Amino acid sequence: MHLIILGPHGAGKGTQAKLVAQHYKIAHISTGDILREHIKNKTNVGIKAKEYIAASKYVPDKIVDVVVVLKLRNNKEGFVLDGYPRTLVQAEFLNNVLRELGIELDAAINLQVDKEELIKRMIKRGQKEKRTDDTEEGIRSRMNEYETKAEPVIKYYRGMGKVIDINGDQSIEKVFKDIKEILDKLER
Ligand code: AMP
């Protein structure tokens, strides 16, 4: 199975991607995790990516695209991509790479959450964990960046008939159950 998972920061994308990967025995490819690993290992990619991540900005497409291609090549049998594509340019790039690898995308899982609820939850978390990047202003600015850039990505996959909309405002278990129900139908 070859999947993408979409949704704003804080919607539970990473949690669901992990559950999906475990259940369907496919690779969980998280660009955020990969970039953090590069930063830890002080690679060239890590050195370049660090300043963007520290400033809560998107890492340039050219850098992210390179690390993704490597991971896709090594996990051709199946994967769930988490945190990529985040822009239309990345989505188009991914489409070309998948075509070259002879892979057809099965679905783009779109986790839908109520924006104001999510913002409230993130502010609470920020206060509890004393995170400096989780001020209301920071959260709203990240959410706006997500919306502006993700909308065309979702539209792109809708046009391809690949989007599965999932209500993300439910328990972890219920969200996963909803995802599984639809993916199981696709597999048959
Ligand atoms: P995440 O763990 O998915 O929230 O990613 C952490 C950070 O890594 C993001 O805030 C971005 O700076 C960077 N990042 C991860 N994936 C991408 C991507 N597809 N495009 C650009 N930047 C990314």
Image (cartoon, rainbow, N blue to C red):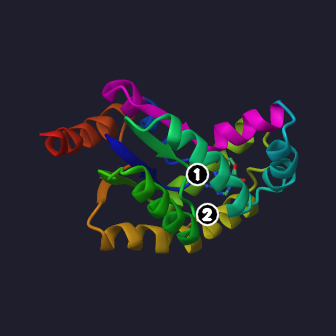
What residue is shown with label 1?
9
What residue is shown with label 2?
143
Left or right, 62 with respect to 73, comes to right
Q: Does the magenta portion include 48?
A: no
- Indicate the secondary structure of the residue bearing disc 1: loop
Which image quadrant for residue 43?
top right
In this view, the residue in front, 183 or 9, is 183
- Indicate the secondary structure of the residue bearing disc 2: helix
Quadrant of the frame with the N terminus: top left
Across and down, in percent, residue 55 comes to: 83, 56
Residue 112, can we see it? no
Residue bounds of the magenta highlight: 19-40
Q: Are marks 1 and 2 in contact (CB under 8 Å)?
A: yes
Mark positioned earlier in the residue sequence (1 or 2)? 1
How packed mark 1 is, by other alpha carbons closer than 10 Å (few <14, some 14-19, many 20 or more), is some
Across and down, in percent, residue 132 comes to: 82, 47
Left or right, 148 with respect to 157, comes to right
Q: Amino acid at mark 1?
A: His
